[in-house]
Image: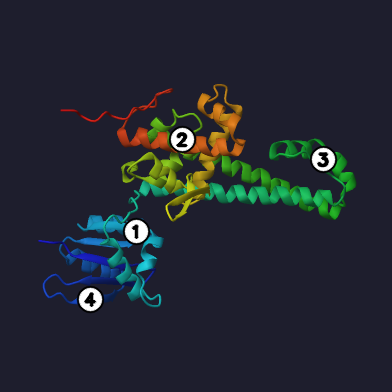
Amino acid sequence: MNRTTYGLDIAKRVFQMHWVDPDTGEIVNRRFSRTELIEFLAKSPAGRVALEACGSGHWWARKMRALGHEAVLLHAKFIRPFVQTNKTDAADARAIWTAVQQPGMRTVAVKSEEQQAVLGLHRVRTQLTKFRTMQIYQLRSLLYEFGVTLRTGRQAGLAELQDRMADIEGRVPGLLMDVLREQLARVHSLDEQISVLEKRIAAWPKQEASCRLLLAIPGIGPLTASALVATVGDMRTFKSGRELASFIGLVPQQRGTGGKVQLGAISKRGDPYLRTLLIHGARSVLFTSRKPNPWAEELSKRRHANVAVVALANKMARTAWAILAHGQAYQPGYVSTRPQPETN
């Protein structure tokens, strides 16, 4: 017996579901409240429920699995082409129902509560880092109005500010100096908060086996390893390392017509935070590592430094996929070989 496929458009209070009744063939497009939807799914036979991977999507996917249904998450950009009319809840539910039944449709891996919690820590850290950067830039600009310049770099600039505090107090009016002291105290407070968050994030890879495997890759530290595992979820969702690199946005854009394909800059699709972590890790390996990567060094001699950095980040992503998809430990200098076809 074929299972019923449901297309579900979720919101905060209103939930629209589209499906075809397997017995009568009737097309049903029905609106539920949160409680009504859970009761309906609890009483319905096990089916396949498709929904958009948006806010609360992973929670609903876990809830539907607990009720005995198969939950399928779809990216919003794969659903939009199937909206035939104006955008409404009913049209979105029908589009989701149509999209999930297309051959080869890509899905999003359902995240666990722990993975979402780790990503939440990363998001809070990112926001605090932005606040800290804004505060420091404002400090520099206000001091510059009174002829005070500081060395470049966050740590160097703050250290110089502390050393020259007596001189700065004599050059900046007292009315503004009190505010600058308060702002400097906020910067130090943000430093402490970010440090606490980084310690909490770094503690998770010690408990997660997949993160411990990734930590052996040069350029991948606790932040990158935890963000990669929490963002991707099940690495076997991707068929190859290149597909993972494409998901992160580390592959060239392809444009072709008439049999000619042109490669452009990297696509920058996917999660920009994860892509940034990988690129920063690759930059660290290329320019500050005590054991430089021979492949990346040779590439940097032929191409621009930024091109070599992105290429190394791409390689790191592919290596991470190979390790987690096949459950193997990292082997420095490993060379993959294509299996030979069997001969009779």
In the rendered view, tell whether residue 221 sits above or below residue 67.
Answer: above
- Image x and y of residue 235, in percent: 34, 42
For marks 3 and 1, the one nearer the N-term is 1
For marks 1 and 2, the one nearer the N-term is 1
Residue for badge 3: 165
Q: Does the residue at mark 4 contact the one at mark 2 (Cβ under 8 Å)?
A: no
Q: Mark 3: give few (<14), some (14-19) or many (20+) Cα within 10 Å.
A: few
* Mark 1 residue element: strand
* Mark 3 residue element: helix
Which residue is found at the position 74% from the left and 36% from the top? Answer: 159
Residue 74 is tagged as 1
| Front one among 264 and 38 | 264
In the rendered view, tell whether residue 30 sits above or below residue 173.
Answer: below
Residue 315 is tagged as 2
In the rendered view, tell whether residue 221 sits above or below residue 78.
Answer: above
Residue 28 is tagged as 4
For marks 3 and 2, the one nearer the N-term is 3
Which residue is found at the position 77% from the left and 47% from the top? Answer: 140
